[in-house]
Amino acid sequence: MSPFLDLPPLTAARFAAIEDRVAALLHTTADVIVTQGEALLPLEAAIRSAVRPGTTALNIVTGPYGQTFGGWLRDCGAEVVDLAVPYDTAVGADRVAAALRAHPETSFVSLVHAEAATGNTNPVAEIGAAVRAHGALLMLDAVASVAAEPLHTDAWGVDLCVIGGQKAMGGPAGVSAVSVSARAWQAITANPRAPRRSYLSLLDWKERWTDAGRTALPHAPAQLEMLALDACLDRIAAETLPATIARHRAAAAATRAGLRSLGPLAPYVTSDGHAAPVATTVRTPAGLDARELAAAALRSDPAVPVQAGGGALAAEMLRINHYGPAAALGTVQASLTALAAALDTVRADGVHTDTLHSDGADAEAARGAAATAWTAALAG
């Protein structure tokens, strides 16, 4: 029999211990609920639990997930104020504070920490201070940032912090978690529209699990996903969280440095300070379809984590993922080599030659620039 089919049942004590390890990763003393599903589950649960008809919500949009949150907020009957910024930058705390002053009735703010889809990251510490001074609840999507950059849930005033295991943690997509502050529980408990007897119900978890002493699980847990999450936490502990964060930052710095030596390609997020550590998005020159270039890169090396952007950005943006095990210099260099080969392929085919330099892309120079930036980032 497979060892994965002959495991003893996951006990309530083991489940609770994993929750406690997640809480430590988030630097929070708040309740943590591990949910059995992809992170969209607790993200939607947090919004539908805390927001009621008539709530004024400030929804900060720096990528596609902010757009999704706006839809859920409106479904809940909220009056939604969208604060949208171009996807190639980050939102500043001053803009958030100004939006809160313009809408003093705001009681809920939704924010994405790092947008893997667009390659930007937002200054949560400063934004959190502005939101807390206003008195609103702050929900943070930290799915792409956890274990890739600092995440201080309590110190930053985050009331609902959602994470997933599939990016920088290097784990499964089928398990996620949300921390819930005392202020958030007050709002959820007072909301007559909060989901009950539902997979989206945080109150069910609170009453049947957290408040009941975490001694009896309310349902059969997804055992393999929970064990995989525990193994991810083991790996982060062995490497140390600061080292894991430093490795992701080095991968981003190396990718951006290598791209800048490839001529016609440039980081989509122009400011290094606004760049996410989990993925680097790439702007292709006018007339060169990013989907075509990504396909050529994958033909050169099918193993590289390169893909075209999504939605309206698919033609002008491609993305290099460098999270989890892929946050490694070798993976970054392989991705740059594949992109250099793709540029040469497009040039050799005589397509878009007016947008490309006449000489070939210098893969060796890109790899060297990446290595220098990697070393400098780790040293800094």
Image: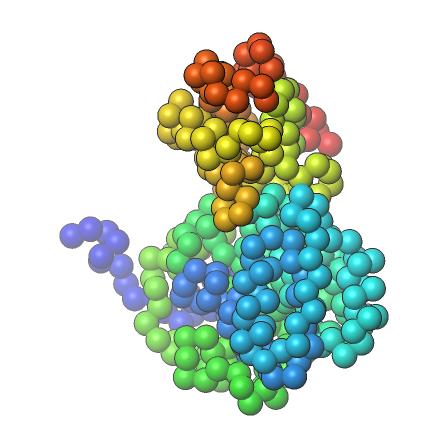
| Residue 371 seen in the figure | no
- Residue 90 image position (x, y, % from top left): 71, 49
Check the image and tell me how it is coloured. rainbow
Q: How many numbered marks appear?
A: 0
19 to the left or right of 58: left
Q: Is residue 53 visible?
A: yes
On screen, residue 116 versus residue 346, left or right, reads: right
Position of the C terminus by quadrant:
top right
Q: Position of residue 45 (x, y in %)?
A: 51, 72
* Image quadrant where residue 51 sits: bottom right
Q: Of all residues shown, which one is farthest toward the top?
A: 359
Judge whether 378 appears above or below 214 on screen: above
164 or 224: which is nearer to us? Answer: 164
Query: Which residue is depicted at the point 64% across and 29% down?
Result: 266
Q: Residue at x 41, y 79 (%)?
A: 198
Q: Residue 210's x, y, as percent? A: 51, 78
Q: Is residue 314 left or right of 136 when viewed as pictured?
A: left
Residue 279 horizontal/vertical position (percent): 56, 40
Q: Against 4, is 177 above or below?
A: below
Residue 271, by quadrant, is top right
Q: Residue at left 58%, top 19%?
A: 354
The residue depicted at 47 percent of the width and 45 percent of the height is 170
Residue 154 versus residue 320: which sits nearer the camera?
Answer: 320
Q: Is residue 176 left or right of residue 276?
A: left
